[in-house]
Image (spheres, rainbow, N blue to C red):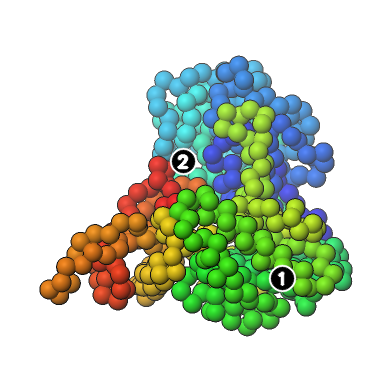
Amino acid sequence: MQHNKVLILDFGSQYTQLIARRVRELNIYSEIRPYNKLPDNIDSYKAVVLSGSPISVRSEDALHPDLSEIRGKIPLLAVCYGAQYLAHFSGGEVAESSTREYGRANLTYIKEGEDFFENIHEGSQVWMSHSDTIRALPEGGKLLASTEDVENAAFKIEGEPTYAIQFHPEVYHSTDGHQLLHNFLIKIAGVNQDWTPQSFVEETVENLQEKLGNDRVVLGLSGGVDSSVAAMLLHKAIGKNLFCIFVNNGLLRKNEFEDVLHQYEGMGLNVKGIDASARFLDALAGKSDPEEKRKIIGRVFIEVFDDEAHRIKNVKWLAQGTIYPDVIESVSATGGPSATIKSHHNVGGLPDFMKLKVVEPLKSLFKDEVRRVGASMNMDSQLLGRHPFPGPGLAIRILGDLTREKVRILQEVDAIFINNLKSWNLYDKVWQAGAMLLPVNSVGVMGDERTYEKCVALRAVESTDGMTADWVNLPYEFLQKTSNEIINKVKGVNRVVYDISSKPPATIEWE
Ligand code: XMP
């Protein structure tokens, strides 16, 4: 079955992925393509959205693709740069703004009777982020809405299904953004809302069956959401021909290996747990450079995984939990044609090394969709709601050199922190949390004795994709109780600090 599809042309805006996600939230399938790489089968798309851009249409290197195959033929929504593009190159006028147009604004005028603004009323808040403004509408342009500072905040082209808005409906601060996308895509463009987690599961299982036939597939489970959901889909499709390997690198959270392995078995997966802790920890002994630690862990993982995979006879495929943000071709911030593809840093090198064909059932999904797909297969909500955890695990949270004793200390600290987040109902409000073991000893006093022991830092962040993050304002009572419990229960730690740095300029992990 062919889904109705929406094409999003990326001009390099920081919000392009958000547009795709908002469209998907309407149960409509969307794809992002660089502005200068139109797909061949353009008429298979029911609507097109032009994204914003950091570049000015007035600059010499303005991005100016030929849209003649789209304009007037397919319903088009032009956002921010897209709107300015329509104005500037079609007889309108774009100039530098005289006032700063960044942040919240309100619609002070909306033309009545337009489907585009159905159920949206004057006063509606919108999010602006631009330094150019549209002074004169292009040929055929008809004004649809204004704000106090931006007269031409929305317009359409008469006689064409072409709409343009200066503001960003994809940003949550545009309170009626969802409604506006709904109006454009469903009312105006007539797109079907046929993209649901259930339909995704049904089609993917069918496609996997067709693609894999009776072949054997190997997949590395990590305990995380992506690999677990990928495994469930493959399990549904090919059952016992899926061979899962779950490696304990000795750097997982406390009891995680046993707990998660047990959970996987309960899900009916054909999974083999390999305890390779000693191999990893021996290889890491005395190493303190973060990148060197990462490399060693990556190398040993490949060795262990490859050994195990070779024990399974006639394996043809390697399955991976790659998701859409890992494969979107991104337009560089300067808008140049040099598109880059991000690599999947968890398992870099594995496919080439193993010489297997690769199958990636989640390649078209965003993270939140992966969770919804998992939920529609009745997977455990705790497994689906797990915080992200880095592939190199606690190795990059133990600053400096690594010993078994340090791993033990950090596992204890981390377990107290995470369990307390759960019992205070804070776990689901935090995007990622963990503890760092610092390479400093500090003086303390316990009973009548002077101590000289380790210091740990707790970190909890809010984020949507890990690219930017804010520290979480955890309640003081929570921090107080957690700090007491750590110092009282974990031998070797006498000081706890809380990390209040945002990303950027800090990063989430300390190494
Ligand atoms: P940073 O520290 O770069 O982290 O702000 C962003 C997100 O990436 C995770 N992270 C990693 N994940 N291998 C991984 O699989 C790594 O080497 C790695 N380094 C950081 C980090 O936990 C956060 O979710």
Closer to the eye: label 2 or 1: 1
* Above or below, comparing residue 503 to residue 474 in the picture: above
- Residue 26 can be seen in this image: no
User: Which residue appears at 74% of the width and 26% of the height?
Assistant: 66
Residue 334 at x, y = what percent?
Answer: 57, 28
Of the numbered discs 2 and 1, the one sitting upstream in the chain is 2
Ligand 1 closer than 8 Å to label 2 CB = no
Residue 229 at x, y = what percent?
Answer: 65, 67
Q: Which residue is mark 2?
A: 126
Picture quarter containing residue 88? Answer: top right
Q: Amino acid at mark 2?
A: Val
Which element is circle 2 on?
Answer: strand
Which element is circle 1 on?
Answer: helix
User: Which residue appears at 56% of the width and 32% of the height?
Assistant: 333
Residue 439 at x, y = what percent?
Answer: 35, 56
Residue 46 at x, y = what percent?
Answer: 74, 45
Q: Amino acid at mark 1?
A: Glu
Relative horizontal placement of residue 22, taking residue 312 as reference (left or right): left
Q: Out of 244 and 290, give the one closest to the viewer.
A: 290
- Residue 64 can be seen in this image: yes
Picture quarter containing residue 311? Answer: bottom right
The circle drawn on residue 350 is none
Q: Out of 427 and 195, give the one closest to the viewer.
A: 427
| Quadrant of the drawing holding the N terminus | bottom right
Q: CA distance from mark 2 to mark 1?
A: 54 Å
Label 1 environment density (alpha carbons within 10 Å; few <14, some 14–19, many ≥20)? some
Relative horizontal placement of residue 186, taking residue 136 as reference (left or right): right
User: Which residue appears at 71% of the width and 70% of the height?
Assistant: 308
Q: Out of 326 and 112, give the one closest to the viewer.
A: 326
Q: Out of 73 and 493, give the one closest to the viewer.
A: 493
Q: Which residue is mark 1?
A: 308
